[in-house]
């Protein structure tokens, strides 16, 4: 083991050879009270969803939906790895999330919106009201915006109830929505409009964040300009108002192009639109995410398989009943929000809470006040939010009278001590926790404990979800044995209904990115030959629980949000002053990881604080504030291999004060020393060890 450890610092060491040591954590068990009311308590579920019953086991999830026409083939593997699910089936996602609940639940809240200003009242939208609003908007989108089944529409909106209404109206028509996270810049939105070929942009005027009313409409102008430069014209911009009847943006409306939805909707009052019966394989939405190239990829999700998967996992793993008040603190602009604020909970007739703002404004008690007031009993958030709340108010939860039965954590590895605070203080020792590992590409949870059945282990995501068979491969295509303590690349051996269909407009990249690495035979039509490569490092313990270490590609997970280093680097290179740019992750106490930038300058350009500032501003404009670097280092040269590859791993080591390992094979080892001195100061002593994802970082260079 010691040998491998030593090697892990060497430049050539592959990701999968890194050995990891960590203390085994003790198990925690669900309470009898939780088990007594849980949806999934029968341990036979493991057998029902075992490989022997695959793929028919997923009928159990699909049967949670209402189908217009039942499918004839559960899984079609004729064109690997483009799997088809529930082939021949027809259904409508909006019908499943709204119409079918009216008989029993029309007066129940579907959505509860909590505005940031505490002086503004909470807004409840019943299933009946949701039905009316979605129908009116669907009529407008069809008759006024001219949208039809199969068209794409880009939605760049903050967290207001009109966002899920808009998504569901699209789904009703079979229009493919592409929601861009509201915090992304106008430019980032414009590139996504162009890639998806959207003619319509749906946006909002403003929203509250940290006590300020932000001008959101301003982004639309930039987005349209960028989309136009990339060859995509937008005909109409449809604008929701944060306060009905009151325009909250300083950006002018363009006559003939921009329309206020609250005004236009008056013309569609009371209109009903028949939900379009969609093929199970018809795309439901696109969700752009970062990968290892500069261009974000549009993950294309199907209607039937996706909806079945989020309904099944919401019911069994989040334990959602129609009587629960469920609050997922994510933003709907990320996959977590799509699957576990909108489609999963609403397909089960739950009450789903959405809130505006940030967890700690105006103070560290806000989250717990909301939980108390709405009597939330299922809570879903990220390690970053938990760390933030723990730091700013470790005793706050005790002051409020709320009781969670179930809590989720998602998006990043959670440190065991943070997990214990979540369990003991936030969960008051009563709530079960599921640590759910998955990705934008996956539709829903892949690894997690079954809350009433499996014990919890702090820091571990748990075993595969029902019907998911994870494994760990090393770089030599060998499966790593459970309990060996060796890390490797986590893969899923089988297809599942929630997996994306393809990358929008780029089939080759889909195959290349997720399936080429471990494909056993490219000609095979047998799914066993096509493991899905997730690009995360992980360790499999003897009990079958997976501990996720982090990305093995050029993605940085900032506060649970994915950013591509190549995207940030490309943004830097738009400045004529910059010759080369390298972006690396640095450890941050709250956000997990944040990007740090190294740049070298074009000939004749002198280093100055102004240039560093310009780099930061450019990144914010091109991507958004979430990508803001912690520091920008202007260096004389970049460490490179003899073949000219930029060694990001060496820079990551320097930024994190870790040992740079063996650098003698580099073309310019002396550069490393001068950069190190610049960043760490003279005489700084590097730490030998560090988090595993940093050791892996840049491994695919
Ligand atoms: C990371 C978010 C550890 C992982 C749903 C993955 C996690 C990336 C966990 C996907 C978890 C997600 N424990 N790491 N429970 N969940 N990740 O696409 O690196 O925004 O590849 O999807 O987040 O991020 P994405």
Image (cartoon, helix red, strand yellow):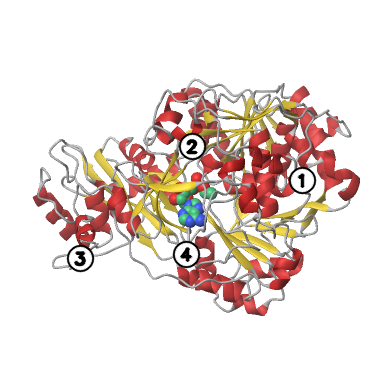
Q: Secondary structure at mark 1?
A: loop
Residue at 61%, 24% in the rendered image: 199
**Mark 4 neighbour class, 10 Å CA radius: few under 14, some 14 to 19, many 20 or more:** many
Residue 309, quarter of the rendered image: top right
Kindly report which numbered mark, 4 or 1, lies closer to the viewer in this rendering: 4
Q: Earlier in the sequence, mark 4 or mark 3?
A: 4
Using the image as rendered, state which of residue 340 and residue 238 is in the foreground. 340
Measured in 3D between alpha carbons, the distance from the residue under mark 2 to the one under mark 4, in whole angstroms, is 34 Å
Residue 623, quarter of the rendered image: top left
Q: Earlier in the sequence, mark 3 or mark 2?
A: 2
Q: Which numbered disc covers residue 244?
A: 1
Q: Where does label 2 land, which residue?
A: 188
Q: Secondary structure at mark 3?
A: loop
Kindly report which numbered mark, 3 or 1, lies closer to the viewer in this rendering: 3
Count of numbered tags = 4
Q: Secondary structure at mark 2?
A: helix
Taking the image as drawn, is residue 158 in sight? Answer: no
* Contact (Cβ within 8 Å) of mark 3 with mark 1: no
For the N terminus, give its image quadrant.
bottom left
Q: Earlier in the sequence, mark 1 or mark 2?
A: 2
Measured in 3D between alpha carbons, the distance from the residue under mark 3 to the one under mark 1, in whole angstroms, is 57 Å
Q: In the image, residue 118 lies at what x, y percent?
A: 70, 64
Measured in 3D between alpha carbons, the distance from the residue under mark 4 to the one under mark 1, in whole angstroms, is 44 Å
Q: In the image, residue 38 lies at what x, y percent?
A: 72, 61
* Contact (Cβ within 8 Å) of mark 2 with mark 4: no
Kindly report which numbered mark, 4 or 3, lies closer to the viewer in this rendering: 4
Q: Where does label 3 land, which residue?
A: 686
């Amino acid at each position: 083991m010691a040998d491998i450890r030593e090697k892990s610092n060497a430049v050539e060491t592959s990701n999968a050879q890194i050995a990891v040591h960590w203390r085994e954590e003790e198990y925690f068990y669900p309470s009898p009270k939780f088990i007594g009311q849980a949806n999934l308590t029968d341990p036979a579920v493991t057998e029902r969803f075992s490989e022997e019953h695959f793929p028919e086991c997923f009928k159990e999830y699909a049967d949670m939906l209402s189908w217009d026409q039942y499918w004839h083939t559960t899984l079609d593997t004729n064109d690997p790895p483009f799997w088809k699910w529930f082939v021949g089936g027809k259904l409508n996602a909006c019908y499943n999330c709204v119409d079918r609940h009216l008989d029993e639940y029309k007066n129940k809240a579907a959505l509860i919106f909590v505005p940031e200003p505490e002086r503004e009242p909470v807004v409840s939208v019943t299933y009946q009201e949701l039905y009316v609003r979605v129908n009116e908007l669907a009529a407008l989108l069809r008759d006024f915006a001219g949208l039809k089944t199969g068209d794409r529409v880009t939605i760049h909106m903050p967290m207001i109830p009109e966002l899920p209404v808009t998504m569901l109206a699209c789904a009703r028509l079979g229009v493919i929505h592409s929601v861009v996270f509201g915090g992304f810049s106008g430019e980032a939105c414009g590139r996504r409009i162009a890639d998806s070929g959207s003619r319509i942009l749906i946006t909002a005027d403003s929203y509250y964040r940290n006590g300020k009313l932000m001008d959101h409409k301003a982004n639309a102008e930039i987005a349209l300009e960028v989309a136009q430069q990339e060859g995509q014209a937008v005909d109409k911009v449809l604008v929701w108002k944060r306060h009905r009847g009151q325009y909250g943006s300083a950006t002018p409306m363009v006559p003939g192009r921009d329309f206020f939805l609250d005004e236009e909707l008056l013309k569609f009052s009371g209109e009903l639109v028949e939900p379009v019966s969609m093929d199970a394989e018809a795309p439901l939405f696109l969700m752009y995410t970062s990968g290892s190239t500069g261009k974000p990829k549009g993950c294309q999700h199907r209607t039937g398989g996706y909806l079945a998967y989020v309904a099944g996992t919401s019911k069994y793993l989040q334990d959602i009943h129609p009587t629960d008040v469920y609050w997922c603190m994510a933003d709907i602009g990320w996959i977590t929000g799509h699957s576990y604020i909108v489609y999963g909970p609403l397909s089960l007739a739950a009450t789903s809470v959405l809130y505006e703002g940030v967890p700690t404004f105006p103070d560290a008690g806000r989250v717990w006040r909301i939980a108390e007031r709405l009597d939330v009993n299922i809570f879903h958030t990220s390690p970053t939010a938990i760390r933030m709340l723990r730091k700013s108010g470790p005793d706050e939860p005790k002051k409020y009278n709320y009781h969670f039965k179930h809590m989720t954590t998602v998006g990043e590895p959670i440190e065991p001590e943070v997990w214990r605070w979540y369990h003991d203080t936030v969960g008051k020792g009563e709530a079960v926790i599921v640590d759910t590992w998955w990705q934008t590409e996956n539709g829903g949870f892949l690894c997690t404990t079954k809350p009433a059945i499996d014990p919890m282990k702090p820091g571990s995501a748990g075993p595969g979800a029902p019907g998911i068979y994870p494994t760990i491969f090393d770089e030599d295509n060998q499966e790593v044995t459970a309990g060996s303590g060796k890390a490797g690349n986590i893969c899923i051996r089988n297809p599942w209904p929630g997996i994306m269909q393809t990358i929008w407009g780029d089939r080759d990249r889909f195959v290349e990115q997720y399936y080429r690495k471990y494909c056993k035979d490219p000609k095979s039509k047998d799914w066993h030959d096509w493991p899905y490569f997730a690009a995360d490092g992980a360790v499999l313990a003897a009990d079958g629980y997976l501990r996720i270490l982090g990305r093995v590609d050029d993605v940085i997970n900032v506060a649970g949000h994915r950013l591509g280093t190549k995207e940030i680097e490309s943004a830097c290179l738009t400045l004529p002053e910059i010759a080369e740019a390298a972006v690396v992750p640095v450890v941050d106490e709250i956000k997990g990881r944040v990007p740090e930038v190294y740049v070298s300058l074009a000939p004749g350009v002198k280093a100055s604080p102004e240039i560093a500032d310009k780099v930061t501003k450019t990144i914010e404009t091109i991507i958004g504030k979430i990508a803001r670097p912690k520091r920008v280092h202007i260096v004389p040269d970049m460490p490179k291999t003899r073949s000219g590859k930029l060694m990001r791993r060496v820079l990551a080591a320097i930024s994190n004060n870790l040992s740079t390992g063996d650098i003698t094979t580099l073309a310019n080892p002396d550069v490393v020393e001068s950069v190190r001195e610049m960043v760490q100061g003279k005489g700084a002593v590097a730490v030998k060890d560090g988090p595993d994802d940093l050791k892996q970082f840049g491994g695919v260079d």
